[in-house]
Image (cartoon, grey):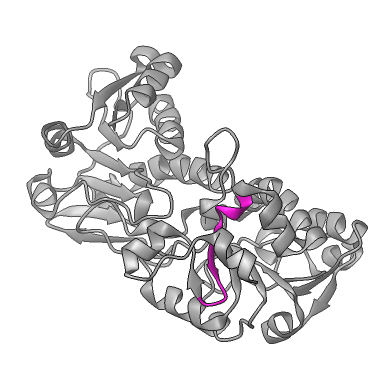
Amino acid sequence: MLIGVPKEIKNHEYRVGMTPTSVRECVQNGHQVIVETQAGAGIGRSDDDYKTAGAEVVQQAAEIFERADMIVKVKEPQAVERAMLRKGQILFTYLHLAPDPEQTKDLVNSGAICIAYETVTSARGGLPLLAPMSKVAGRMAIQAGAYCLEQPHGGLGMLLGGVPGVDPAKVVIIGGGVVGTHAAHIAVGMGADTWVIDRSPDVLEAHWQQFGRSTNSVYSTRDALEKHVLEADLVIGGVLIPGAAAPKLVTAEMVKAMKPGSVIVDVAIDQGGCCETSKATTHAEPTYVVDDVVHYCVANMPGGVPRTSTYALNNVTLPHILNLAGKGYKQALSDDVHLLNGLNVIHGEIVCEEVAEALGYKYVAATEMLAAS
């Protein structure tokens, strides 16, 4: 199979779909790989590195989309990229379709086979292609929040961990999954007063087992959310419903009642955000203020640390790339129900139920579409 790796063009996105190491693995398995020039610059890898690994380096993304059987990216295709997708072409990348009707419409019209990293599952019940970036984003969320709490950046002028004789900041983490767990790691390490809110007793128990009294766990109710968000100096939104738009757990009224200079880092912004006042931002302009509360809502947070993020992502995507390239999408998806769960759009139909429900499309079962094709 001919695999194409274009340079990412989203604002301040420095990751790349495949490292030279991944390219070499594909080439050694009998596949061809074409890579757009400078695609790996953000992770410190040159065109020569890709050539040494066996890739052909081309000058324009248009050639990648024209020639490749499968496109491997990191972030969702931008409008100019979506216009170049072909019927029957495989797209393997993060999509986050539920809050993005324009992208969904374009992918439906393209006739491409669109497999989303974030809905691929595992036998253990997790989301293995989303998890590495959730780990990175969770850890970055505390760094970003600590920075925003500084007064020159709009915050209330508070050191996250305090100093002897002065209270630390109260950090409230909404959602105790992968993002929440890794955010808690950093918050605890920096000495913050850390609270984790979740509605799953199993998740709360896991946090107790892992952190003990270093964190405070709270069962999620409306009363609990209101109490702790209003008391918080820093709120981390780490809620996820796979494939679906994030629930709006922090209301505009709650934001209005928060401390002036407090900070919200909405890691759930890729799925629309869990705060009513959240809107996607970029690394170029990461924050804005609503009712004196600083909002950090960068939709590609891990793109700010592309070396760490790209290699972590390739560790989990490479086996699926090899599977799709080696078997073709029909056989690969038929053989692996967990990869099949990543299929969101195929031949103009929505086959992810959460996306169909969120955007008002007719839902068609993925197995039905595979059988028909």
Q: Position of residue 244 (x, y in %)?
A: 37, 55
Query: Does residue 281 appear anywhere in the picture?
Result: no
Q: Quarter of the image holding residue 181?
A: top left
Q: Residue at x 57, y 67 (%)?
A: 369
Assess whether residue 204 is covered by the magenta stretch.
no
Occupied quadrant, residue 14: bottom right
Query: Where residue 360 sits in the image (x, y, percent)?
Result: 32, 70
What are the residue bounds of the magenta stretch?
A: 339-348
Q: Is residue 341 magenta?
A: yes
Q: Residue 277 sits in which quadrant?
A: bottom left
Picture quarter with the C terminus: bottom right
21 or 202: nearer the viewer: 202
Given residues 308 and 318, the one toward you in this image is 318
Q: Is residue 353 visible?
A: yes
Please indicate whether residue 59 sits to the left or right of residue 352 in the image: right
* Labels in figure, total: 0
Q: Is residue 256 above or below residue 287?
A: above
Q: Which quarter shows the N terminus?
A: bottom right
Q: Determine whether 121 is above or below 31 in the image.
A: above
* Identity of the residue drawn at 61% across and 81% down: 85
- Look at 74% across and 49% down and name the residue there: 319
Q: Is residue 349 above or below residue 127?
A: below
Q: Where residue 280 sits in the image (x, y, percent)?
A: 34, 64
Up/down of 79 relative to 6, above or below:
below
Q: Position of residue 60 (x, y in %)?
A: 71, 85
Frontmost residue, 354 versus 69: 354
